[in-house]
Image (spheres, helix red, strand yellow):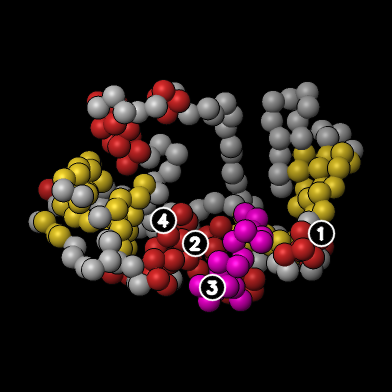
Amino acid sequence: MSTTATNDKPTVLIVGAGLGGLMLGALLEKAGVPYMIFERATTVKLLGSAMSIGPTLLPIFQQLGIYDDIVATSKYMTHIDTYNEDLESLQRSDYRPIEEFTGYGHYIIARPKYYEIMLKQVPPHKVHFGKRVLDISEKDDKVTVHLVNNETVEGDIVVGADGAYSVIRERLYGQLKAKGELPEEDQEDLPFSCYCLVGQTKVLDPEEFPIVKEPISQFRAIIGREKPFSVSP
């Protein structure tokens, strides 16, 4: 099977249907630019913990028409409290001056809920699950994405939104390196020297944990000084 996308606007091929790929798809949908998203997973796995969103993203959500949905699904946050291993207060990062300056607050949102909202912004027929990318090739200002089962899709721009160890970046870097055009700094290993373990509790009972009743989200971080780890509950 071979598919060639034709349009007077450039066609964007997005590899990866995570939050980055969906955000780009939503923006292209709003702008009327043709695109397709390819995801190697066959189904959506709504995993992950919570994440902070604020003035850098909220204006974009407003333009996409999902600001109210995002805020309604989130919990308002004004600051982050940091403690040492003995639970002694180290500092408080107050976000309220930023809110006063930008007009947008900070919120904590569950990653699965955030993903659900973003997935709804992309028409289902433009997200292709179970489509693993094997390779990419370029010819005459066109780019071809080679998928499993000998499928190919042609477009004008390919975007690798498939994570830190991106297949697209690996293929592009390989092609550039073969031509002697890859900068030395891009040939180095990723500078990761830590691991991040993410877990979720079951839904907390407000009667047992009254803190969840508070209208403002409690974000607290514990910095490991004598031990090689930190905790952000």
Numbered range of the magenta stretch: 51-68
The residue shown at (81%, 49%) is 93
Say whether residue 215 is left or right of residue 36.
right
Assess whether residue 69 is covered by the magenta stretch: no
Which residue in the protein does label 1 denote? 97
Helix, strand or loop at label 2? It is: helix
CB-based contact (under 8 Å), mark 3 and mark 4: no
CB-based contact (under 8 Å), mark 1 and mark 4: no
Which badge, 2 or 1, comes first in the chain's sequence? 1
Q: CA distance from mark 1 to mark 4?
A: 32 Å
Which residue in the protein does label 2 denote? 115
Which residue in the protein does label 3 denote? 63
Helix, strand or loop at label 1? It is: helix
Helix, strand or loop at label 4? It is: helix
Q: Position of residue 158 (x, y in %)?
A: 30, 50
Which badge, 1 or 4, comes first in the chain's sequence? 4
Image quadrant in which you'd find residue 206 = bottom right
Image quadrant in which you'd find residue 207 = bottom right
